[in-house]
Amino acid sequence: MTAKTTREILHETALKAPLSSGVYMWRNAENTVIYVGKAKNLKNRLCSYFSGKQSVKTRLLISHANFIEYITTTNEYEALLLENNLIKKYNPRYNICLKDGKSYPVLRITKERFPKVFKTRQIMQDGSTYFGPFPDVCALDTFIETIFKLYPIRHCRTLRKRDTPCLYYHMKQCSAPCCNKISEQSYNDYIGEIKRLLEGKGNETVAKLTTEMKAASKELNFEKAARLRDGIKALMVLQNQNIVETFDSDDRDYIAYFSEGELVSFTVLKIRNGKLTGRENYRAESLNDDDDLIGEFLAVYYEDEKTIPPFVYIPQTTEYEHISRWLKEEKKSDSNIIVVDSGDSPRDVAAIQMARQNAHEDIVRRLRDRGDTPAMEELKLKLGLDVLPVRIEGFDIAHIGGKFPVASLISFYNGNPDKKNYRYFRLKTTDGLIDDFASMKEAVSRRYTRLLNEQEDLPDLILIDGGIGQVNAVEEVLNSLGLDIAIAGLAKRDEEIYLPGNSTPICLPKRSDALRLLQRVRDETHRFATSRNQRLRTKENTDSIFTELSGVGKKRSLLLQRQFTTIENLANAEESAIAQCIHVRANEASSILLQAKKLLEQQNEKKKLQKKSLGIAGTTKEKAAEAEYIADLASQALAVAENRAKYGKSKEV
């Protein structure tokens, strides 16, 4: 009898679970609790991990688990309390354990006879005065630099008695308290002014600096005026950075989150006395459902009831009643939990959106820092690749009616864009011809022929923006080059993945990490190709036809265009008029006139062919030219049809 797999054993445990509420714990092979969750119905919740299309979170949890145990409770609220206690006890890997995502700097004024002003990220309980935090670090640096130029306060880290002052004293940037060059009272007058400025009472100082800046400008001391101007800007940024005047005077926290797979980032906007005093980012890993994330976060974040403000604003969640009850009964807090939806005050909606946007940006940074390893691992599994697709190269074709065909090549390394390896190809074999198969073959052939010749590293996976036809065409090129590189095509309509020689696509769940990575590559190839095609069309529309004449550059082209307007007028002009217009000799003017006449003839021929293609009658000679033109179009159409028959149905254009 075949032994049961770990997954089958876990599933059997879920099927035997009771229908009551409770808490369940997933343990790994070392008997370590890796996740704690709560449920209104234990059996239904645990069975949901093994039914339907599984999310990335679920697959990750099952892959690391060895067995499940559970504890029943009388009701769902008791399950919430027990869940919090077990999380604190076991500190599971896939439950929220707060990590501050960013420690923003503060400005510290030390508690000394002659205080020092400097930037720090550490707050010490030593009597120092702190201002901030300041998310705009550059503005804070500029502000500190300006303060040192405006106020003669000390720069040294430790104040020691000296016999002679340092260089800053001679530069008039320090009053040399180390040499008793200034009294303690006078020195602290400067510190008091800096504090008033940071406390939002610095309008007089700003006015003083503005007057000084204008005076320096009048004296033609522009360097000083520019320095003061930058200092005033820095002061204004710092004054306004932590102030949001539209909030009421009560204290409140706005909390939102963003998740990607098991990664979750929370942002807390802290409003105190009606002002935004800071933004805190916290990073966590959790496999909890979205509805349960806010409750799990609050239980950890507000561990000390003294830190809970009167109002806490959160996104919509089904756990609202349990969170409010927990706050009152467990934390003995009178604070109000307020759920914000789209119909609430625009101020509250905007604050929650701002918090969510900050959390989203932090998730993007985390993904960039760690690389998209889960997506690459899933991609390797789903596509049956031999190696992890660390280097992915994507191709796309862009053109307008066959005009200016461009192929884009973009590169992703470790799941993130590697822009230094982006390339584009001006296609030569399909200029004026709509044939995606031939275009893709040309781009791929040029790319990998060059890599082979230069003995450069090859990608682990090639992604084609298209279906089975494009994929088969690319495989033919690689086979001719003797290359064994994995290929996949992503079709736009249903996000289906095609592999060479297999018309049955692979369909991944919409929340699949692997699909998300392929979509990012595909979208970037499309953006890069389209932008290049647009630049070429813009160049054609802005370039003057006169520049096609030999010996005529931009300056001469502009002069000719101003006087003659069109190439027809130039072709019918006198040599002397051309020579006088651009100041050239008679022989040069004659050459330009001859070229203009030839260029005009070419234009007229194109117009005649266009008329013939529209069915407009002409002379016998013109009819012959028309027949030749139509035959050429027919041969092009035949080539496209042969490609379609050979490689399969083309993607939509």
Image (cartoon, grey):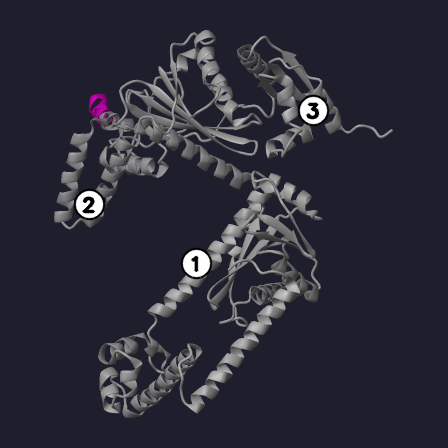
Secondary structure under badge 2?
helix
Whole-Å distance between the Cαs marked 3 and 2?
66 Å
If you read the primary sequence from the N terminus, does the residue marked by circle 3 or circle 2 appear first? 3
The disc, 3 or 1, on the residue closer to the chain's N-terminal end is 3
- Give the mark nearer the N terminus: 2 vs 1: 2
Q: Amino acid at mark 2?
A: Ala
Specify whether residue 161 is in view.
Answer: no
Closer to the camera in the image, 459 or 194: 459
Residue 506 location in percent, x, y?
65, 47
Residue at image position (49%, 81%) is 629
Q: Nearer the viewer, mark 3 or mark 1?
A: 1
Q: Position of residue 579 (x, y in %)?
A: 25, 87
Q: How many marks?
A: 3
- Measured Cα–Cα span from mark 3 to mark 1: 50 Å
| Residue at position x 23%, y 83% in the image | 581
Q: Horizontally, is 576 left or right of 504 in the view?
A: left
Residue in the foreground of this view, choosing between 23 and 64: 23
Tell me the SS state at disc 1: helix
Residue 531: which disc? Answer: 1
Find out whether the residues at labels 3 and 1 contact each other: C-beta distance under 8 Å: no
Disc 2: which residue: 225
CA gap between label 2 and label 1 equals 42 Å
* 609 versus 498 height, above or below: below
Disc 1 residue type? Ser
- Residue denoted by label 3: 28
Q: Residue at x 16, y 39 (%)?
A: 210
Tell me the quarter of the image containing the N terminus.
top right
Q: What's drawn in magenta, residue-wise?
A: 183-193
Residue 187 forms part of the magenta stretch: yes
| Residue 86 visible somewhere in the drawing | yes
Q: Is residue 348 above or below residue 561?
A: above
